[in-house]
Image (spheres, helix red, strand yellow):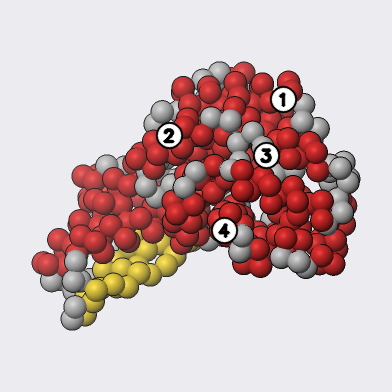
Amino acid sequence: MSGDPEQEYFADGMVEEIITGLSRIKWLFVIARNSSFVYKGKAVDVKQVGRELGVRYVLEGSVRKAGGRVRITGQLVEAETGAHLWADKFDGALDDVFDLQDRITTSVVGVVEPSVRQAEIERARRKRPDSLGAYDLFLRAVPYFQSIMPGDANVGIGLLEEALKLDPNYAAAHAYMAWGMEIRVLRGGFNEADAIAGVRHARMALAHGTDDATALSIASLVILHLDHDFEAASGAIARALSLNGSCAAALYWGAHVHAWSGDPVIAEDYANRALRLSPFDPVSFEAYLTLGTVRFRKQHYDDAAAFYAKAVQANPRFSSLYAAQTTALAMAGRIEESKSLARRLLELEPDFRVGPFMEFFVKFARPEIVDGLAEGLRKAGLPE
């Protein structure tokens, strides 16, 4: 904004980094640098940009430098309506220009993906049902998995079945189908047929989604829970993060995979990075569940209960979070609190039983988690 050539080079570098980062997200169509730079330094109408480039969203921003510090502003705009979907500013020191560029790029890419996806979900909801393609059906299905409860998941599964009829190799649809089956297994009766179907869809997601970070991430959860294959699950997370280091889904589910079956240091790092990138993400509860489980593994039960409480607050309809907090409270000696929470768990999931629940976890979770989980649930007086 100052006309200083040094700032212009810095701004150009930022734009290139952000375009590269966004281009790693398979489901986004991102205009290349040369076409974007046509509008550089001009006062343009966002609606005109959208028409000329054939895009639905425009990311724009500015750079200001003062002494050894720089402020970067950015905003994401829906081109057709001019509506603002997101805006923020980033401040940093120019001690290490490349490090600053990396940090800002990571933050911008991390927040743009969920913002655009939510806008696309709303767009799909507005479309007539008789004009829906596989992508629109997929977008309509996604919100039904956020509660992680079987009733909602069944609605999402129905939409995804229609999407897969139109596109049998749709990796993201297979990944969410796998997740839906996993939800039904854990909270809908431990049905073996659902488990087999879940693994099949997860493997299809891995096969067809080698360049789709989100599909790989969700499939990793199911591969761990239903196929009990930590190596494949952690490998899928590593692949997802190599494709897009700013993928919040990869960090959230990678945190889960490592918290329950792998390295707690990696789990905590992924959870904290995920919360920084996408703090209002529908699966943000997973970061708090991870942070609690890392402490549960160390037998720091009061700290674990505090993080589990944050997970419950982030997703109050997810019954398994109540089970985790109940256990931590019981193991911390806070029996009355644990029994009160156990009653809430049974309200959400009347058929909850300790035996089947533990049979699910014992196949993939670390022994120190399994032993403590079972002991705490029984101390809280939950039915066997």
Quadrant position of the C terminus in the picture: top right
Q: Which element carries disc 4, helix, strand or loop?
A: loop
Q: Decide: is 120 above or below 236.
A: below
First along the sequence among labels 3 and 2: 2
Q: Which of 295 and 254 lies nearest the eye of the viewer? A: 295
Which label was assigned to residue 231? none
Q: Which element carries disc 2, helix, strand or loop?
A: helix
Q: Callout 3, which amino acid?
A: Phe
First along the sequence among labels 4 and 1: 1
First along the sequence among labels 2 and 1: 1
Label 2 Cα neighbours within 10 Å, binned few <14 / some 14-19 / many ≥20: some
User: Which residue position holds label 4?
Assistant: 298
Label 1 Cα neighbours within 10 Å, binned few <14 / some 14-19 / many ≥20: many
- The residues bearing labels 3 and 1 have C-alpha atoms spaced at a distance of 16 Å
- For residue 277, say whether it is visible: no
| Residue reaching furthest to the left | 5
Q: Which element carries disc 3, helix, strand or loop?
A: helix
Q: Nearer the viewer, mark 4 or mark 2?
A: 4
User: Which residue position holds label 3?
Assistant: 361
First along the sequence among labels 3 and 4: 4
- The residues bearing labels 4 and 1 have C-alpha atoms spaced at a distance of 33 Å
Which label was assigned to residue 235? 2
Q: Decide: is 372 above or below 244.
A: below
Image quadrant of residue 91?
bottom left
Image quadrant of residue 339?
bottom right
- The residues bearing labels 3 and 2 have C-alpha atoms spaced at a distance of 20 Å
